[in-house]
Image (cartoon, grey):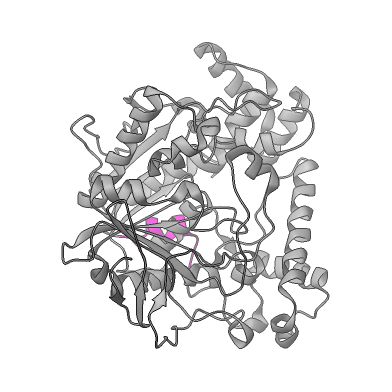
Amino acid sequence: MAAIIQTEGGRIHGSSENGLSVYRGVPYAAPPVGALRFRVAQPHPGWNDVLDCATFGPIAPQIPNEALDALVGGAPQEQSEDCLSLNIWTPGTDDAARPVMVWIHGGAFTIGSGSEGLYDGAMLASRGDVVVVTINYRLGALGFLHLPALEESNFGMRDQVAALRWVRDNIAGFGGDPANITIFGESAGGMSVTSLMASPEATGLFHKAIPESGAGHHGMYDEQAIANGRQFCELLGVDVDDVGALREASVADIVEAQGQLEAKMFEVVAEGGEAEMPFRPVVDGEFLTEMPIDAVRSGSASGVAALIGCLDEENKLFSAMMPGEPPNEEDAVALLDGMHGDGRRLYDIYRAIRETRGESTTPFEIHSAAGGDKLFRVPAQRLLDAQTEHSDQVWAYLFDWQSPLPTPHGPLGACHALDIPFVFGTHKIASAFAGEGVAANALAELTMDSWLAFARTGNPSTDDLPWPGWDPESRTTVILGESARIEDDFRGEEVAAWADVL
């Protein structure tokens, strides 16, 4: 049994595992149930006896994504509204003041948890002598429903703030340094990281940030959030102004209604429109006063070190999850027109550039590349440019490691989420997705060492790889794949095609 630790809520004990002390399912806020549903997270009332924190707590209510689980692996976990807990891996509950790394999971703000196997913090904690924390937060409608009658909003994001406050106030007892906290996350977790960089409510709660495959263009304005909320209430069968009915509705009915709303959004995609997440951070005038990219550009995260990047073929994961045949040229042009406004020109740009490089020019590959750039690569570069104005520690990366996993459209390639098992060193439990062998092991070691160096000093450079800082002119990027290399203005011609769009 790991040492008993006094937290502000009460005493807890965990387990001793391979030289680490591990505490799972630690409450960081009051259960958001009953009158606290659709309310900003409140302090936990505490407990009297020593709380057993040897096992993970329940995850936020959600509809598991079976297609995603089939690709990257996943197992059912207990769900409950009482889900506001975090997990800690530490090399020692002493006064060593280790760097702290707080992971925010992804999943389109509707799925996921901090207890997924790929997010096991043991390898990072052991390798880098750091404290690793993973968190749960409210998802879907329970976390992001936005209606005037509720008077509050961004519940899931404010859960993250509550977790960071808990870490600040308690992590010293777990051997961590509250003055050296790095937040990192992928996809919706990366978008969360940037939203926290933008929010006045999170100022001072962290010192370094790693948004992976998620930047600052993915917030939602008040009007659209209210429109989505009205659609949700219609599907749930309650009046938009009846807060009592919203608080009394069953979790099952809420999750079913949010699933129906998501399905409506996917119908728009099938008709050639853009994919939109109906539940995500809202520019509400309080938690976010403007779109995250604009806030960061204005200096909201001044002085925060940032390591920002994505993968080379992000969209291939989403394509593998969608049924049907790949697009022909006419379909691809129409889809790109919905993204860019000038689909024919964009298609021709990508085709010519890819042909010059000797890369595939099928409509599927062109649509996939452009979609990934629009959602991830271009926003990442805009965020890099924005933060460079306010910090002298800004770094860019791009993963081009290839997943061998076959799909109807070919191997997954350097797809969305492929970086996660290398960041955590958990690639061996997902070898079908991540690949295996000497090169995979070397990439995991280099990635972990870079992330750990950044968490310790704000600079990801290692003995094996000195990182150049981001320069908006040269756009120097570290490419992580079969071997690490440094490129200037990588795929710059494609990025330039979005200059007047995003």
- Please tell me which residue is depicted at 23% across the width and 51% down the height of the picture: 129
Question: Which contiguous range is marked in magenta?
Answer: 288-301
- Please tell me which residue is depicted at 55% across the width and 25% down the height of the picture: 404
- Image coords of residue 87 (percent x, y): 41, 63
Q: Answer with the quarter of the image where residue 183 lies.
A: bottom left
Q: Residue furthest front?
A: 1
Q: Nearer the viewer, residue 47 or 414?
A: 47
| Placement of 162 over or under 256, stated as above or below | below
Q: Answer with the quarter of the image where residue 461 lies.
A: top left
- Please tell me which residue is depicted at 63% across the width and 82% down the height of the picture: 150
| Placement of 254 over or under 76, stated as above or below | below
**Residue 425 visible from this viewpoint:** yes
* Quarter of the figure with the N terminus: bottom left
Give left or right: position of 99 versus 319: left
Q: Nearer the viewer, residue 301 or 344?
A: 301
| Placement of 310 over or under 242, stated as above or below | above
Give left or right: position of 175 versus 182: left
Residue 346 magenta: no
